[in-house]
Amino acid sequence: MKISLAQTNIIWEDKKANETKAAEMIEKAASEGSDLIVFPEMSLTGFSMNIDVISEYENDSETTRFFSEQAKKHHMYITFGAAISCPDGAIRNQAITVDRNGAVISRYSKIHPYSHGVEGKYFTGGDSVSWFDIDGVTASPLICYDVRFPEIFQIVSKKSRLIVIPVCWPLQRVHHLDILLRARAIENQSFIAAANRTGHEMKYDYTGHSQIVGPRGDVLTEIREDEALITAEIDLSEADDFRREYQLKRDRRPDIYKKYM
């Protein structure tokens, strides 16, 4: 399987300009034979809390239409982020995946809004994880701050050998991102594909560090600061081999963990 990460310098709250940028990345990924391309969190707006401007209705989403059309045009899977107004009236930060025909096959709402900032004041956290199929491979999406919470990684990796993560992770804590992604890959014996943004947004600088990490913790490919697309071919059987060789999940004791939670 070939996976591309689109590390974009997102133009603040300008969906049309970011669509142009995203289309170029998708076309390049398609030319490289990618099966899946992953974009940063809130892909066409930046990490804005201006929900009156950026949010879209779930059943009438400009962002979803755009990426669905691109997926169908280039016959590839796309994972992207958007602020979605859900049927219950809540605004949720979502990672959405569309298949080669442009159909939505996964809609994950970020379980952990970033309380250190103000995301929790504007966005409602999700209450479920997601699994989806990529040509016979089970994958799961998580979003940015979720990386600091290992419990949900254990849950999704019961079925998934690939975890895709749109992020918007600033420069001052980017060394945490590097460490956490490797840790999540090792302890879950899964491939991790995380796409971060670059550039400047409001008061924050971003330096990317988008990367694909193998199940043994090896960084297969990464981009540091530049706006760029990277593509890597992964062999999912490596995750299966490592799980057979080193049976971590067999030794977990959730019955005991639950006693203290």
Image (cartoon, grey):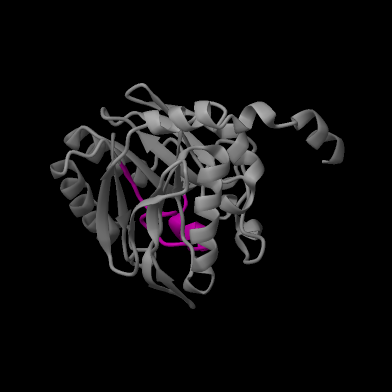
- Residue 109 placed where, x, y %? 55, 42
Residue placed furthest toward the top:
136
Does residue 243 appear to the left or right of 32 in the view shown? Answer: right
The residue lying at 63 percent from left, 64 percent from top is 118
Does residue 240 appear to the left or right of 89 in the view shown? Answer: left
Front residue of 131/251: it is 251
Identify the main secondary structure in magenta.
loop
Q: Magenta segment range?
A: 37-55
The residue lying at 32 percent from left, 24 percent from top is 135
- Residue 110 placed where, x, y %? 56, 46
Residue placed furthest toward the right:
259
Location of the C terminus (image quadrant) = top right
Place residue 32 in its image quadrant.
Answer: top left
Location of the N terminus (image quadrant) = top left
Residue 226 sits above or below residue 214 on the image: below
Place residue 88 in its image quadrant.
Answer: top right
